[in-house]
């Protein structure tokens, strides 16, 4: 007996809706909506793993089910892994949203000030930072080496082999 590999159309549509709505919510600025988007995408991906696994069969244990009627354990293992990853992402986003609420009384992701500064400098075709290594002409390698601490110098050793110095 062969397994029916034709996917259920309703499940395919549900997967598409879950992933599409999840991506839409993922692009929002509110961390709560991003969190719901992650959860929806995770559930859509889990359903796609199950659909890709084919029809349900018997337990994949040799001796309990004929080999041609066994279900494939790989999609189930992948779904379990995806559930754990989604749970971790959910916990992380909840922590971010909670911290944002504590600090700003909202959970919206703000524009990064540094991104604006770099974009403005790029529009003016100016470097975003000064390279101090190329601008500093007063020092040379020999002076920098003389100023650097020489770790190869012997450290004074007191009695009983201990280093001398403050206790």
Image (spheres, helix red, strand yellow):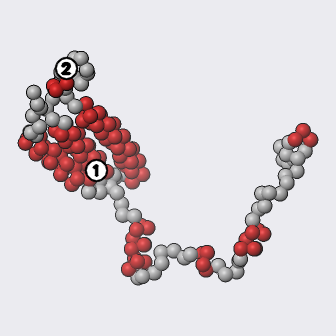
Residue farthest left in this picture: 9
User: What residue is pinned by disc 1?
Assistant: 34
Q: Could one spot residue 43 in this view of the protein?
A: no
Quarter assignment of residue 124: bottom left
Q: Could one spot residue 162 in this view of the protein?
A: yes
Quarter assignment of residue 14: top left
Q: Residue 132, image x and y in percent?
A: 60, 75
Q: Residue 23, image x and y in percent?
A: 23, 53
The residue under the point 47% across, 75% down is 128
Q: CA distance from mark 2 to mark 1?
A: 43 Å
The residue under the point 83% across, 57% down is 153
Q: Residue 17, image x and y in percent?
A: 14, 48
Q: Earlier in the sequence, mark 2 or mark 1?
A: 1
- In the image, taking residue 133 as reference, residue 153 lies left or right, namely right
Q: Residues within 10 Å of mark 1 (few under 14, many from 20)?
A: many
Closer to us: 129 or 152: 152
Q: Give above or below for 91 relative to 60.
A: below
User: What residue is pinned by disc 2?
Assistant: 65
Closer to us: 16 or 32: 16
Residue 68 disc label? none
- In the image, taking residue 23 as reference, residue 148 lies left or right, namely right
Secondary structure at badge 1 equals helix
Q: Residue 94, image x and y in percent?
A: 35, 43
Q: Do labels 2 and 1 touch, CB within 8 Å?
A: no
């Amino acid at each position: 007996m062969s397994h029916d590999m034709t996917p259920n159309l309703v499940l395919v549509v549900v997967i598409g809706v879950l992933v599409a709505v999840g991506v839409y919510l993922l692009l929002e600025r509110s961390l709560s909506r991003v969190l719901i988007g992650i959860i929806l995408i995770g559930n859509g991906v889990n359903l796609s793993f199950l659909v890709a696994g084919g029809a349900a069969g018997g337990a994949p244990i040799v001796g309990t089910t004929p080999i041609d009627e066994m279900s494939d354990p790989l999609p189930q293992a992948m779904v379990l892994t995806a559930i754990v990853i989604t749970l971790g992402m959910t916990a992380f986003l909840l922590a971010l949203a909670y911290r944002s609420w504590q600090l700003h009384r909202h959970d919206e992701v703000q524009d990064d000030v540094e991104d604006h500064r770099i974009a403005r400098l790029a529009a003016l075709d100016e470097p975003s930072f000064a390279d101090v290594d190329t601008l500093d002409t007063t020092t040379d390698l020999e002076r920098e080496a003389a100023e650097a601490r020489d770790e190869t110098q012997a450290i004074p050793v007191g009695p009983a082999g201990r280093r001398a110095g403050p206790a």
